Amino acid sequence: QLGNELYDYFPTKELPNKVRLAVACCVNMCGAVHCSDIAVVAVHRKVPTLDEENVGKMCEIPTTVASCPTSAIRPNPKTKSITINDEKCMYCGNCYT
């Protein structure tokens, strides 16, 4: 949507120069937001919700646990899933990627 809104400006002289536009879904910056003129980055604002039944099928539990910089994610052997300590979670989104 954002690109569509700016599309008409690109062939004109209304913008001061060519503009690099980036949109990223998280702070991991695969959208190259760090080297763009206009960047929109989504920020997680709450602890991820868990689908206990499918976490083990969709995620590699050791990789998910290792991705957390604050050690808020721990394996839960009873459910073959994970648990998240809400107080330690800093909403970085590493566990999503």
Image: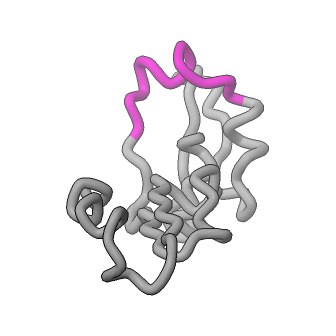
The image shows residue 18, relative to residue 7, as above or below, that is below
Q: Is residue 74 left or right of residue 92?
A: right
Q: Is residue 57 magenta?
A: yes
Residue at 38% across / 29% down in the picture?
51
| Residues rendered magenta in the picture | 50-61
Give the overall secondary structure of the magenta segment.
helix
Corner quadrant of residue 61: top right
Q: Position of residue 19 (x, y in %)?
A: 49, 71
Closer to the camera, 76 or 49? 49
Corner quadrant of residue 88: bottom right
Residue at 71% across / 64% down in the picture?
70
Find the residue positioned furthest to the top.
57
Closer to the camera, 76 or 35? 35
The image shows residue 10, relative to residue 31, as above or below, that is below
Q: Position of residue 95 (x, y in %)?
A: 60, 45
Location of the C terminus by quadrant is top right
Find the residue positioned furthest to the bottom.
16
Closer to the camera, 17 or 71? 17
Q: Is residue 48 left or right of residue 56?
A: left
